[in-house]
């Protein structure tokens, strides 16, 4: 085999170093995605983990979660899985220019799970694991095996967030990076917001957060 093989991990790390230096820009990107999706509501919070309910390392770790009731369409699934490519970049009414902005979440974690609700009853369940290079021995290959119990647990979480009028929507489960989750392997970047002594998410408890988010919507 000849030629070059690109490293998605290196591309993500370069993007993070160039664009993001704290946790707030990640929230900003997700709020903008929700607005692009014509969402009327977005909620987010921290979760300590599901240690007793699931069998997956990404749900047995502390996490941030996000839900918005915007549109989710089949094309959005491919956009989420693509790096730096967005087939709907010219359409400001989609869930969201899932290009470089969505990749900002890797500032806080190594992989994520999401649920997409189309409004017709279909639910997209997917894990995005950038370490997966389609080889059987890739790092964190165990993350790709997500059981039905895990998906049902996340759907139960969504059920507590949805309102009766929320037919469509997008739910993101973002496990926070910890040393234990990496199990001795190197991180995408050296930022560990899931550790007890981390200050990375302190902005979530600042009184100015609501105003900062309001400014994002105004833009």
Image (tube, rainbow, N blue to C red):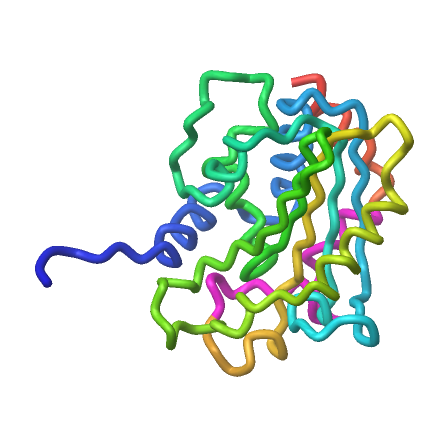
Q: Position of residue 128 (x, y in %)?
A: 53, 54
Q: Residue at x 78, y 67 (%)?
A: 49
Going by the image, does 86 lie left or right of 105? left
Q: Position of residue 178 (x, y in %)?
A: 63, 71
Q: Residue at x 65, y 73 (%)?
A: 57
192 vs 4: above or below: below
Q: Residue furthest bottom?
A: 184
Would residue 111 be counted in the magenta stretch?
no
Q: Position of residue 134 (x, y in %)?
A: 36, 63
Q: Residue at x 58, y 23 (%)?
A: 94
In which quarter of the view is residue 1 placed? bottom left
- The secondary structure that dominates the magenta segment is loop
In which quarter of the view is residue 194 placed? bottom right
The number of numbered discs placed on residues in the rendered structure image is 0
Indicate the quadrant containing the C terminus: top left, top right, bottom left or bottom right: top right
Q: Position of residue 42 (x, y in %)?
A: 78, 33
Going by the image, does 49 lie left or right of 125? right
158 vs 58: above or below: above
Going by the image, does 53 lie left or right of 10? right
Q: Magenta residues?
A: 187-205
| Viewer-side residue, 90 vs 202 | 90
| Viewer-side residue, 51 vs 204 | 51
| Viewer-side residue, 97 vs 32 | 97
| Viewer-side residue, 176 vs 209 | 176
170 vs 197: above or below: above
């Amino acid at each position: 085999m000849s030629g070059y093989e690109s490293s998605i991990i290196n591309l993500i790390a370069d993007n993070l170093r160039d664009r993001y230096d704290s946790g707030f820009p990640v929230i900003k990107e997700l709020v903008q995605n929700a607005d692009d999706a014509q969402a009327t509501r977005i909620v987010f919070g921290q979760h300590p983990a599901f240690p007793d309910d699931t069998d997956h390392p990404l749900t047995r770790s502390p996490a941030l979660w996000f839900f918005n009731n915007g549109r989710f369409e089949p094309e959005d699934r491919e956009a989420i899985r693509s790096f730096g490519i967005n087939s709907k970049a010219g359409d400001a009414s989609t869930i969201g220019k899932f290009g470089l902005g969505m990749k900002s979440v890797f500032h806080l974690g190594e992989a994520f799970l999401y649920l997409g609700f189309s409004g017709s009853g279909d639910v997209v369940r997917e894990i995005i694991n950038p370490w997966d290079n389609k080889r059987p021995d890739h790092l964190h290959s165990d993350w790709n095996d997500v059981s039905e119990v895990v998906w049902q647990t996340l759907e139960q979480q969504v059920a507590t967030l949805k309102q009766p009028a929320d037919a469509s929507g997008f739910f993101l489960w973002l496990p926070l990076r910890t040393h234990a989750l990496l199990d001795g392997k190197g991180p995408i970047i050296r930022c560990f917001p899931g550790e007890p002594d981390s200050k990375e998410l302190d902005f979530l408890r600042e009184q100015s957060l609501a105003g900062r988010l309001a400014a994002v919507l105004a833009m």
